[in-house]
Amino acid sequence: MSLRLATFNIENLMNRFDFSGFRNELRQDRVLRMFDIDSKEDYRALEQARAVSIADDKRQLSALAIAEARADILCLQEVDNMAALQAFEYGYLYKMVGRGYLNKYMVEGNDSRGIDVAVMMREETRDGQKIEFRNMQSHAHLTYGELGLFTAEIAKTNVEDDFVFRRDCLEIDVTVGGRPLTLYVVHLKSMGSPRAGLDGRTASMPVRRAEALAIRHIIEKRFGAERAASKRWAICGDFNDYGERVMIGGDGVDGYTFTPVREETSALDVLTADGFAENVVERLPEMDRWTLYHTRGPQERHLCQLDYILLSPSLAARNAQQVPEIVRAGQPYRTIFPPGQEVERYPRTGWDRPKASDHCPVVIRLDMA
């Protein structure tokens, strides 16, 4: 009896237009910066035309990536609301996978842009085992003070009553063929831009570390610190952090170089360093663990893992031979692949856009017996 579990940051699955870029250039699409737009009304009209023009191709590519993952349960990040998720499933996914992800779950979290985490699941696994929803719990309400996580580092950017999770830690209980499984779906604080003399990752690290500590607290409170290792649970989502990168040098003329680099610290350490959970993507070769290509130009390029499926020790041991898959055919053509990893892109994929997402889906087959 097996289950295919996946996570995917689907990148701004919206059913509304975001007009905040008229006053905030950080949220303004680059093509609109090419034009002198004097009025808010003109900006709204142009933004609507831009968003609609790219949405259809993008969502076809997103659906192709999900279809390739063949997941029974799919954890998503950056979903606007249930209406957007239903429209996407019916209008795009259904054409590729048929009567599939009828059961959908999400709760509005804390994100200022309104992007939330969500879960879609089939009624049964591909081999016919029933998937039954049991319970759902949001943890978006938890504060630094409530969890004892308000430190001097956190005080530089937050107050004690602020919410710990930038989005949510959505806890969902299911049974698969009668066996229990608990999912924790997360999307941690983004790295942001450099500030206060620090790079964005370092500056925002205390917030992500507090989120990771909160996840661990939730799990240990639920199952007990001594018993958590023996239970079936998985943490799925976009952690916006990495423990290693593949640095890219060179160019397309003289050839690219790929150099693996380990980081001294990561927010993930809270969950993995002492064996509390296993990052199953580390079962892949070092050069093949990336889920995102990052670039700010030729002087700053790397591949890294931002998207994770972390398994409890019990679930990891039960599936010690299972190796995850990373679906990369929805990546834009600007993504630089290490030798031997190139894939055939989906039709209509562009140099930078359209694309399935800037992230890649991660999926693993789990034995639930």
Image: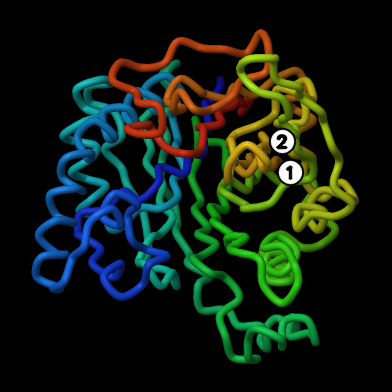
Q: Amino acid at mark 1?
A: Ser
Position of residue 62 relative to residue 185, above or below, is above
Question: Depth check: 203 or 31 in front?
Answer: 31
Indicate left or right for 211 with 30 as reference: right
Contact flag, marks 2 and 1 (Cβ < 8 Å)? yes
Q: Residues within 10 Å of mark 1 (few under 14, many from 20)?
A: many
Q: Which mark is residue 315?
A: 2
Q: Which mark is residue 312?
A: 1
Q: Where residue 192 appears, x then y in whole percent?
A: 58, 63
Position of residue 257 relative to residue 49, above or below, is above
Q: Where residue 121 appears, x then y in whole percent?
A: 38, 37
Indicate left or right for 80 with 71 as reference: left
Q: Where residue 332 appears, x then y in whole percent?
A: 44, 27
Indicate left or right for 12 with 289 as reference: left
**Which residue is located at x 37 percent, y 41 percent?**
120
Q: CA distance from mark 2 to mark 1?
A: 5 Å
Position of residue 215 relative to residue 251, above or below, is below
